[in-house]
Image (tube, rainbow, N blue to C red):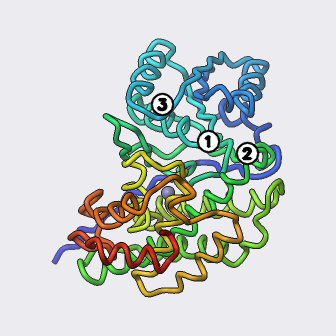
Amino acid sequence: MQFEKFKVMQFPREVLVGHRVLGQVYELASRYARSASATIITGDITYKLAGKEVEDSLSTSGMKTSVIRTGGANSENLDKIESEIRNISPGILIGVGGGSKIDLTKKVAFDLGISYISVPTSPSHDGIASPRASLKRDNHFLSENAVMPIAIIADTSVMVKAPFRYLAAGAADVISNETAVLDWKLAHRLRGEEMSSSSAALAEYASHELLEKVNMILPGVEESVWLVVKQILASGTAMAIASSSRPASGSEHLFSHALEMQGKGSAIHGEYCAMGTVVSMYLHGGDWERIRDAFETLHLSIKAKDYGLSHEDVIKALSEAHNIRPERFTILGDTDLGRSASEKALEITGII
Ligand SMILES: [Zn+2]
């Protein structure tokens, strides 16, 4: 048989991470912009945190710079930004924000074919270095195809100012690779799904590192941000190698998405993933207690009630999570887990 395999991988051209790397923004923007102009996509708070500094350093260096301040990552905001960008036609986009602003920027970049730089202001999830965008359309959050940033500027001196909750959530999003990779291996064994061992190994390395060093993830310590962000970037690279979110998103993410879609709880993405990882690891028969203890060290609660979720909410989410992405086979299987099995797993793991 003729050899017909092929693969496409996208990586950022430059990744700057660490203390005060934001100072390099003009150099990077001018290197990759197709004309001497830039548009910054940011929010009100994130503008103050880092957006203004980006604007000042670009404009004082002679780059024509505009700023679009926007809100949540939904289709209305996306449409508004895209029509503004069509008028301005900037040489490069710069997304400055926690999650939603970067999601919007990467989607605009994808739709309009403009390169963008990702400037995360908080280390709360692995989307800062991935080609997927999470967007709300008709009240549903969907993960959509977008593009990798041409460059990432992850300034730890900026991100350390974000509340510790975001850092803990970012660590949890990486720790969730533990069950994501188990699900991938399961799909490979049972369904013959293509699996990249190098991608899986890197995703596992990232989560192992954080599980081992969880005691070193502390509030207000820039080195803790460094520790987590490095592994967020490693997770992003694992996804880039696989050309898929598979190494970092399995049953725990399906459960997380099911809860996010219910729109009832007050948790942020990484916190839902933390709950999902503990219960998924239990279903896989792995060391779920070690993962639960790690979240406890991070002061990250996995209890449904702490986020205003009822027992019914989480039972329903776990039982029906497999419907979110039926093509992504996981330990949750192809049919509803059922009420009693879901309830038991959530009770044993302490989520309800
Ligand atoms: Zn995630």
Tell me where residue 295 sits by quadrant.
bottom right
Mark before the other along the chain sequence, 1 or 3: 1
User: In the image shown, does 266 or 270 lie closer to the viewer?
Assistant: 266
User: In the image shown, does 41 or 295 lie closer to the viewer?
Assistant: 295
Query: Looking at the image, is mark 1 or mark 3 nearer the viewer?
Result: 1
Q: Residue furthest top?
A: 87
User: In the image shown, does 286 or 203 lie closer to the viewer?
Assistant: 286
**Label 2 near label 3: C-beta < 8 Å?**
no
Please state which amino acid type lies under the numbered disc 2: Ala
Q: Residue at x 47, y 16 (%)?
A: 84
- Identify the residue under disc 3: 114
In what element is the residue under mark 3?
loop
Residue 245 image position (x, y, % from top left): 42, 60
Q: Residue at x 25, y 82 (%)?
A: 190
Count residues near mark 2 (Cα–Cα under 10 Å), then give few for <14, some for 14-19, many for 20+: some
- Identify the residue under disc 2: 162
Q: Is residue 165 above or below residue 178?
A: above
Mark before the other along the chain sequence, 2 or 1: 1
Mark before the other along the chain sequence, 3 or 2: 3
- Identify the residue under disc 1: 98
**Label 1 near label 2: C-beta < 8 Å?**
yes
Please state which amino acid type lies under the numbered disc 1: Gly
